[in-house]
Image: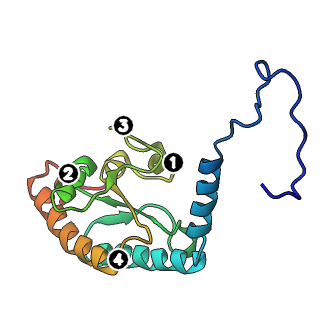
Amino acid sequence: MNMKTETAPIRGQLSVEKQWPGVENVPLIAGFKKAVEIMFRNFEYRVNYVKSLRDKLMSGILNSVSDVITNGPLGDARVANNVNMSFLYVEGEALTVELSTHGVYVSSGSACTSRVLEPSHVLIAIGRKHEEAHGSILFKLSHYHTREDVDYALEVIPKAVERLRAISAWKQSESRT
């Protein structure tokens, strides 16, 4: 804490007060401060780098896999590290498992759902049909990923989708109505 920071004294018996002086985890607070400083070094560069990975992944998927819907906005309106796409005629859970066998780790649904096999309420709210929401995959990127990581994912994803579509009960000839 900076000596110029104004604070109010803590008064009263320590056993009944909610704030006790001297019990703050000072090393944890100092460590957190340092972690924040490190993460905000070159912040704009990191954000732009992650955006470039996101855009490369999204355009690569759209160019190499048919029947894919982008969930959410494009460009600067989209969060830098988020890629959420619905792969039609494929179950998201099956695609999650298939990709993980090749070292590509994703989740199905949206960031707002966790371990729930119901379609994401967020995807339904933006107008996705149940079958479209069930085929959604969430990719998360960070500044620790490389362009080579994205290239590898773009190599694996089309093959995984093709394999699963070949054995899927949903057929591409079926109407999307």
Position in image of residue 134 (x %, y %): 32, 47
Q: Name which quarter of the figure residue 142 lies in.
A: bottom left
- The Cα atoms of the two marked residues, 2 and 4, are separated by 22 Å
Left or right of 15 in this view: 130:
left
> Which of the marked residues, 3 or 1, is nearer the chain's N terminus?
3
Disc 3 marks which amino acid?
Val
Position in image of residue 77 (x %, y %): 58, 70
The residue pinned by badge 3 equals 116
Q: Are marks 2 and 1 in contact (CB under 8 Å)?
A: no
- Residue found at x 63% / y 42%: 25
- The Cα atoms of the two marked residues, 3 and 1, are separated by 17 Å
In front: label 1 or label 4? 4
- Residue found at x 89% / y 29%: 11
Q: Are marks 3 and 4 in contact (CB under 8 Å)?
A: no
**Rendered image: mark on residue 97:** 2
Q: Secondary structure at mark 1?
A: helix
Position in image of residue 135 (x %, y %): 30, 53
Disc 2 marks which amino acid?
Val
